[in-house]
Image (cartoon, rainbow, N blue to C red):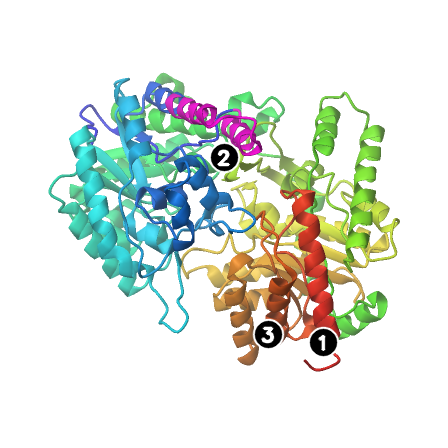
Amino acid sequence: MVNVTDGYGSSILGYPRIGPHRELKRALESYWRGSLSRAELLAVGRDIQEQQFSELAATGLTQVPGNTFSFYDHVLDNALMFGAVPKRFQPYRDVMEPLDFYFLMARGRPDLPPLELVRYIDTNYHYRQPELDAETEFSLHPEALLDEFDRAKAQDIELRPVMLGPLSLLLLSKAGQVPGEPEFDTLALLDKLLPVYEELFEILAKRGATCVQLDEPMFTSERSDAELAAFERAYQRLSHAPLRPRMLVTGQYGDFGEALTILAASNVEAIGLDLASHRIRPEDLAAVPGIRRKRLYAGVISGRNVWRADRYVTLEYLNELAKVCPDLVVSTGSTLLHVPYDLLVEYDIEGNVADRLAFAKQKVGEVVSLAKALTEGPSDKWRKRPREVHFKQKHAVRQRVYAITPQMREREPYEQRRIAQQAKLNLPPVPATTLGSFPQTDRIRQARYELGEGRLSYEEYRKRIEAEIEATIRLQEDIGLDVLVHGEHERNDMIQYFAELLDGFATTHFGWVQVYGSRCVRPPIIYGDVSRPAPMSVDWITYAQSLTDKPVKGMVTGPVTMIARSFVRQDQPLHETADQVALAIRDEVVDLERAGISIIQVDEPAIRELLPLRNIGRAEYLRWAVGAFRLATSGVRPETQIHTHIGYSGRAEIVEAIEQLDADVTAIVATRSIEWVLKALKEDCASGHGLSHGVGPGVYESRSARIPDIDELDELLTAAAEAVTPERLWANPDGGLKTRHYWQLEPSLRNMVAAARRIRRRIPTGE
């Protein structure tokens, strides 16, 4: 472990990796298009790595993390480092270049689906889920980690290599299921995996590494007794490895709970706690047996939000912690992967807002400053406490929230609505539709850029968008979809688009955060009371509806997803902010109805993302989250059909919450897990606890380049019809189509429409 001999140490648990100017994104997409060589892509990766560890070392951090860079996803990197390659990919491993094989697993190809894309813990980041089965064998492949370590060492910088801990690697993986055999538990592979970790530790120790970081984020959520026993067994073994660096085990994203007690009683030298997300009282920490003997990485700076820490309150807390754990390192609560690089490049954020913000570079500065103040006392700059900034509250918004009544969250009973909607819409059984977005063409991106640069008038921009909308409507009519969408061509990102049109939100120019691979977003910042100055989508939707006799869905982002995908103010309860956003969305939904739109989709794909990782608080969260959605959608007449788009979960409380949303149709993100979802839906219905409204289980993965054939889609829709009945079934992909090419999109949708029509033809015959 890097020694901290002069006062208290400072470190972070990880850093953004796309490059300050999204260098990695551009290089990746150029490589995938064939316009950049492999050597050039690898050089971009090396440059980002070296710039990162050099800059971090120069900030004054006493310890710099390594192995935090990734060309696509760190979970996939860890799986490959330990040799976890699914059987379906193994034939390609020895015949492809390592980098191309890596991208094959991450992106797939038309005849070979990629690893499934899954949300990481409770963040907005998504990872490619490793696939394990009983026959999985592990082997060590640490070349990338060792190469970076050696390059840093040549510059007299010692990195602390970061990797997933063995338990989280297994728990984050997908268990392969063999028909006719008992369900496989990935933790059954633990005894195979631990020797490979020990092998890596020995190599690192001989290389001169003094500390290694093992991230165990899965243990900040509810874990079974068996999982906790496996955790204890693993770290008892690893901490007694004959030759190893010292070990730092981190519990990022929340309360480390029982895992903290287990680690404190082990020979693990250091423990990292996310004290920004879950602040532990010093007296409670002192009660953990063995904690005083550990080095504590006190994660007091949040890696999840962009607000400056109150340095006085935080320093006072650190002083109390140091009395319990004298060997203390000031740190971040999680990796800084989830925040933008640098606040100082933002030129358009109001000064009184910017003064309260800290991006990744500023958070590193906070860590260093606090460690120095903990050692030497506050500097002269600290003597004058900064003036506290209060944002002007909007009286009209506050009064409107206070005036919310239970009746504003209620609609007529579903059966009455269903009859009224069918009379108005006259849709066939198993209607075919999409979930909103169509590809963003280079022409549209260029038009949006020129508009922002002032080189294109709004009228000319509008004409270009309308031309794209018309082409999208004509294509959908030709394909045979029953309910159309306008394609969202005016929206770069669904959250960013609405945030720019709502008061109380700030948006950035360069605040990019990685979602997965080369996909990046700029999360907006909710800093004040939220209201809607004017309609946001009505003109675009009504123009699309004027082009066709088929219904066109209005597309609006739901209130919970707006706050889940934003950096949210912390000076009031989250449910109050959610209700403010819900009232703004409600106004938009009512205006869409008034403009003649009969189907309105209010997307809530992120409603699970804010669910507390532990049982405590879940019921209360679901109560107000469901309430916010219903507040946004309950201002319309019975004949107006409300759709939503949501992720499915095996948790019973989530299934119940989806039902309580009371949307007329719920489209479900299922991807290749759809067979499991259909089984669960059937079981839920049989037990009387399932979804009773319209359901659209996504029948193919929208993020994959693979084109499903008609027979495959027919089989899935047939199974879905058995689970939820044909009368309530919709056919749709599992997400938007923004990232697809038209040569992929068109045949996939044509096959989906053909499969839906097969189901319709079989309904009268009873097949």
Q: Name the residue under label 2.
A: 306
Using the image as rendered, state which of residue 766 and residue 651 is in the foreground: 766
Q: Mark 1 points at which residue?
A: 762
Residue type highlighted by circle 2: Val
In magenta, the rendered stretch is 21-50
Disc 1 versus disc 3: distance between alpha carbons? 16 Å
Residue 520 image offset from top left, x and y in percent: 55, 36
Q: Identity of the amino acid at label 1?
A: Arg
Badge 3 is on which residue? 723
Within the image, what quadrant is residue 186 found in? Answer: bottom left
For marks 2 and 3, give the CA distance.
44 Å
| Rendered view: 588 above or below 186 | above
Q: In this view, does 246 lie above or below 694?
A: above
Quarter holding the N terminus is top left
Which element carries disc 1, helix, strand or loop? Answer: helix
The quadrant holding residue 602 is bottom right
